[in-house]
Image: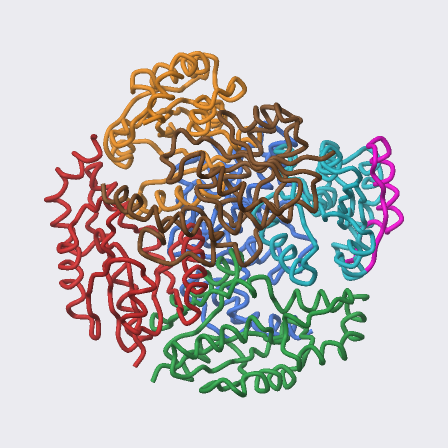
Chain colours: A blue, B green, C red, D orange, E cyan, F brown
Amino acid sequence: MKTALFPGSFDPVTNGHLDIVSRAGRIFDRIIVAVASNESKSALFSMEERKKFLEHVCMDIPNVEVISFKGLLLDAARNLKVSAVLRGLRAISDFEYEFQMAMMNKELDSRFETVFLMSSSQYSFVSSRMIKEIVRLGGDVTPFVPPIVNQALKEKRGKILEETAE
Amino acid sequence: MKTALFPGSFDPVTNGHLDIVSRAGRIFDRIIVAVASNESKSALFSMEERKKFLEHVCMDIPNVEVISFKGLLLDAARNLKVSAVLRGLRAISDFEYEFQMAMMNKELDSRFETVFLMSSSQYSFVSSRMIKEIVRLGGDVTPFVPPIVNQALKEKRGKILEETAE
Amino acid sequence: MKTALFPGSFDPVTNGHLDIVSRAGRIFDRIIVAVASNESKSALFSMEERKKFLEHVCMDIPNVEVISFKGLLLDAARNLKVSAVLRGLRAISDFEYEFQMAMMNKELDSRFETVFLMSSSQYSFVSSRMIKEIVRLGGDVTPFVPPIVNQALKEKRGKILEETAE
Amino acid sequence: MKTALFPGSFDPVTNGHLDIVSRAGRIFDRIIVAVASNESKSALFSMEERKKFLEHVCMDIPNVEVISFKGLLLDAARNLKVSAVLRGLRAISDFEYEFQMAMMNKELDSRFETVFLMSSSQYSFVSSRMIKEIVRLGGDVTPFVPPIVNQALKEKRGKILEETAE
Amino acid sequence: MKTALFPGSFDPVTNGHLDIVSRAGRIFDRIIVAVASNESKSALFSMEERKKFLEHVCMDIPNVEVISFKGLLLDAARNLKVSAVLRGLRAISDFEYEFQMAMMNKELDSRFETVFLMSSSQYSFVSSRMIKEIVRLGGDVTPFVPPIVNQALKEKRGKILEETAE
Amino acid sequence: MKTALFPGSFDPVTNGHLDIVSRAGRIFDRIIVAVASNESKSALFSMEERKKFLEHVCMDIPNVEVISFKGLLLDAARNLKVSAVLRGLRAISDFEYEFQMAMMNKELDSRFETVFLMSSSQYSFVSSRMIKEIVRLGGDVTPFVPPIVNQALKEKRGKILEETAE
């Protein structure tokens, strides 16, 4: 059985992430979505919230499991004995960074593999960072995120404004 | 009458910005330079200073108006009923980011248009961020900014050093 | 009155070209679509055919005129006294080439301006070259070209195969 | 069972191709290497030679099959009922082209998926085109191609020189 | 005698830096490795530590000297009367930034020259930032840094975790 | 004594090439400009013409020698015992190609070094190919090439038109 690990911050999950997960389901037997604990970045949503949103929106996609992890992606991939790590590619800047990460991980463990799916064109400009920026400026992100995330972002808008005001 | 909105932080305005504004005057009937309030970034110059510099340096360019705005660029463009948003392109990294922004705004409002002018080659490496970095290190930015900004940067040098020392 | 010149080979015109022309109509008062005579490349369609397709598909877009030109784009722009040359940007490789052309033309005549519109995301991968490649391999390009071009490509398929077989 | 189709010209197969095939074997249950007939390009090696080299060098990699195909990649993928098309990514220019192809194929058939593996750093500069260029100039490509190909290139050197002399 | 100045933060020095220094020794008569004081970034290692590591690892490379500098690179290059500034290029993002810096310095002083060496492929993904990130997550960076730095990173691990936890 | 080899087709030499040669003279003790015989491309100017133009325009730059070479650049560099090969970098597409070449040559001979100088901004869009294209279309390239080349291009214009008409 071929399993792929799909890691990320998912702060919050977007329709672009969902697109990758559901398409990967046709290629792998099983997908493990892995929320990174991200100690170093101040996340908008807590680990629990980010995991809850993912579980909710992946509910109807077969063979998907949501977990969280701490530490090196490489160690998570080894412990879970996955066939490959799955990443979405949106644009050149993604490509550069992903290339560096994939090569470094490969160097640290030659069995480590990263496979890439390209974002569908309608999501090629959607990122968690842009979603938060638009919400901060009072914009509407309904077309870019699942309804449960859209609702949560509206409730969080106060917090977003406070943080950026500092 | 065709109006273009030229948004930015302008912290501070550079000769590269001026180049774009004056060239755009041959293409559009009217240019509105719009200073973003940038709550989230700690600006070197206040909104009032940034606007004052722009008004001073655009004085002799016909059909240019300087305003400030808060919130989404998309909303500013709608309220002002402009034909298009105008952006300068310097390099690949600009291109990536501008591409994402233009596509996301287009998705949010299909009437929204972004037009791009490429920086003149002599300004292709000039950015507000680099200007501030050079001043911080004690360098001379006379060739890259209008005289009024050059003078103000000299006066601000103390503040720049303090901030980066923290 | 602000006029833009939209030059290209248009061999053949695609839905991506049409998208740019119709969006430009909101920004400029008038668009001149200019088919380059391309002596150096062996075109699939003759100049007459390429012009005919463009006239047909631009029929319902107001303030658009189709012409053909020989020689330097710069000279055509001067003779027609346009405000700017209009180009679509699809991707990085476009960007590099367009950047070089825009800077060289600017150097040859400082009044020359190039403005860019970014392709809509659903056309960001459509090019005349790819259209011809797909037809050559027996594929269907219905979603990417106007019906009149689709029909003509089917009729030309024999010629495309012959050329590539040499 | 998850099958990947790995298409290409393979004119000739390089150690970079082999690296991708053998790594993909850990991710997919089965790999079909598909040699494109490339009517439009004048290949150095005939279809039979290119297939023979691939069969020879893939002999010891389990679950790999070598075929040839004509026409659209999309049609080959459909007929073979593969889970995904597999492509190697070397650099930015690859990325741009691969991105366009993946998006266009996705548009023509929404079930079509392309997955990417990045070249190992030691092969990131190896391409069939460069191999042929070096041989043409009298250089040694021993580190970059399998021994059977190296031998064949030495025998073909006369033909390469003739073609480029025209 | 031709001298090159090799500036950087070196926080900490990596095997990639060492690769550039030792290769540059074949091209220039003398290399001055110059550690920037970096007031604006909170460095992991102090200036003294960074200089000490460099002195230790460059000990056996002939004609290399390690210094520290404050302020503009341009001024350091002038004061030391070097023939050129030396920079390593890893990837596109490096390229963009380095291009801007080289052009701006050239504009400020036309005698200023920057020469570039490309990273060896096995170090093309190694950066001080990634090294620190891997250590923070509990990973092993033995293949990427000199032993003296590896040891120091293990001792600093507590400090790295604290900072990112804030 | 440090010698750099500056290879190219120089068909024809441009002001961009001259800029690189004269700047390199401050970094190296001696520059050998090496015209590649380019059997595979149909050059506009013969090897003798290309060499003659270079000798003429480099006459006043001290320590520059012009030669021609056949075969691998790597072999030329070895035979001439140069310290490094010198290349100009104009843009991303240059970068990609140069990166591949530098890495492949390094792999074939670990002592082989390539150093890069970035084009001055005013020449960042000048290439021999573009020069020939502009002349073909009847344009003026006076600002981009030395007078001796400008004159020769005018005389060759007939030949350029013929070739592209085929």
Picture coordinates of residue D60, whole percent (x, y): 46, 13
- The quadrant the N terminus of chain B occupies is bottom left
Q: Is residue A93 left or right of residue D72?
A: right
Tell me which segment is drawn in magenta: E41-70
Figure disc tally: 0
Q: Nearer the viewer, residue E118 or F158?
A: F158
Q: Is residue F104 left or right of residue B85?
A: right
- The quadrant the C terminus of chain B occupies is bottom right
In the picture shown, does residue E17 fall above or below E36? above
In the picture shown, does residue C132 fall above or below B73? above
Residue at the spot x=48%, y=13% of the render?
D147
For the question of whether residue D22 can be seen, the reply is no
Q: Nearer the viewer, residue F49 or E19?
A: F49
Picture coordinates of residue F44, whole percent (x, y): 37, 40
Q: Nearer the viewer, residue E144 or E116?
A: E116
Q: Is residue A92 left or right of residue A46?
A: left
Picture coordinates of residue E52, whole percent (x, y): 88, 42
Q: Is residue E129 left or right of residue B80?
A: right
Picture coordinates of residue B5, whole percent (x, y): 45, 78
**Magenta stretch holds residue E63:** yes
For the question of whether residue D126 can be seen, the reply is yes
**Magenta stretch holds residue A92:** no
